[in-house]
Amino acid sequence: MGDLRSAVNFVLSSLGEYERIANEVERETSEWARLKLAKMCYRRRDFELVRGILEPFMGKFSSENRKLQALYILRKMDIERGESIYSNF
């Protein structure tokens, strides 16, 4: 699991740097890569890492569709962990 975590941290730091210098097309690619990475970690059941990938970026998605995809992953994860989706209300 350490290798995956190291790879994810490397990709995330690369994405962070990439986004600072990216134009709109590059930002779309970065968002897609972030969602893809979160899905991969979700399938490996590393929920802490999924949350770390998506939550800091929630207000920064350029499209509503990508934001909804990220919310779907987070809520699905909460349900699987037995957490109430209404706990924030």
Image: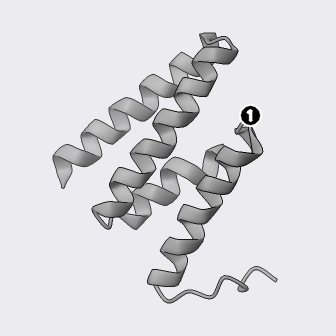
Which residue occupies the foreground of this view, 31 or 14?
Answer: 31
Residue 75, given in percent of the width and then of the height, sits at 59, 72
The reply, left or right, for residue 26 in relation to residue 9 is: right
Residue with the mark numbered 1: 62
Image vertical order of residue 36 relative to residue 68, above or below: above
The reply, left or right, for residue 37 in relation to residue 21 is: left
User: Which quarter of the picture shows residue 45?
Assistant: bottom left
User: Total of numbered circles in the picture?
Assistant: 1
Residue 87, given in percent of the width and then of the height, sits at 71, 85
User: Which quarter of the picture shows residue 80?
Assistant: bottom left
The reply, left or right, for residue 40 in relation to residue 78 is: left
Q: Residue at x 64, y 43 (%)?
A: 57
Q: Is residue 58 visible?
A: no
The reply, left or right, for residue 44 in relation to residue 38 is: left
Q: Is residue 54 visible?
A: yes
Quarter of the rendering occupied by the C terminus: bottom right
Q: Secondary structure at mark 1?
A: loop
Quarter of the rendering occupied by the N terminus: bottom left
Q: Residue at x 49, y 39 (%)?
A: 34
Q: Residue furthest right?
A: 89
